[in-house]
Amino acid sequence: GGKNRRRGKNDNEASKRELVFKEEGQEYAQVTKMLGNGRLEAQCFDGVKRLAHIRGALRKKVWINQGDIILVSLREYQDDKADVIQRYNPDEARQLKTYGQLPDNTKVNENDTFAGEEDDEVDFEYEIDDVSSWNIDVPALCLIPA
């Protein structure tokens, strides 16, 4: 469809959804690498790195990025593979952390890739007075006033 398909989307129900906890046969994981073709590599919080497949209902509607916290369904017949059931937004992931569902050392992806580098000032190793004493040959073209 065209423009009318986009007009009907009202995407504010996702922010008010109920928090889903893991059940038997499910595990929380953090996305380590996106592989393409609806697949990703996830580090599960039970210590196992698994190849996860994004199920069809999530594939085009929910965008999953590296570092996201997800809920995966474990396969009984393949321990190294899993299926992505749900993606948690950063607020939901923080709630899971406060409820004790996620380990305390979990880094919740909040788009702060340069955390701790809040240094706006640039430090120079010389003073302004030192610069005026430098003997620099300036070409004649640079001395012409504009």
Image (spheres, grey):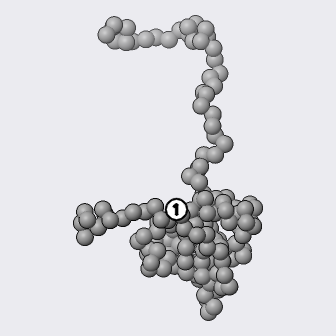
Q: How many marks?
A: 1
Residue 48 x, y percent position in the rendering: 69, 77
Which residue position holds label 1?
15
Quarter assignment of residue 129? top right
Specify few, some or many for label 1: CA neighbours under 10 Å numbering under 14, 14-19, or 20 or more: few
Pick the front one: 51 or 10: 10
Q: Quadrant of the C terminus?
A: top left
**Picture residue at 63% right of the left edge, 37% below the top:** 118
Residue 3 image-quadrant placement: bottom left
x and y percentages locating residue 38 in the rendered image: 46, 75
Image quadrant where one finds the N terminus:
bottom left
Camera-side residue: 138 or 113?
113
Q: Is any atom of residue 67 visible in this view?
A: no
Q: Is residue 125 above or below residue 23?
A: above
Write the residue at 42% across / 70% down.
Answer: 61
What amino acid is found at the position of numbered circle 1 in the picture? Answer: Ser
Residue 80 coordinates in the image, percent (x, y): 62, 83
Helix, strand or loop at mark 1: loop
Is residue 137 positioned above or below 47 on the image?
Answer: above
Location of residue 127 in the rendering, given as x and y in whole percent from the top left corner: 63, 14
Q: Residue at x 58, y 7 (%)?
A: 133
Above or below for 37 versus 75? above
Which of these two is toward me, 105 or 71? 71
User: Quarter of the image holding residue 143?
Assistant: top left
Residue 7 seen in this snapshot: yes
Residue that extends furthest to the bottom in the rendered view of this protein: 77
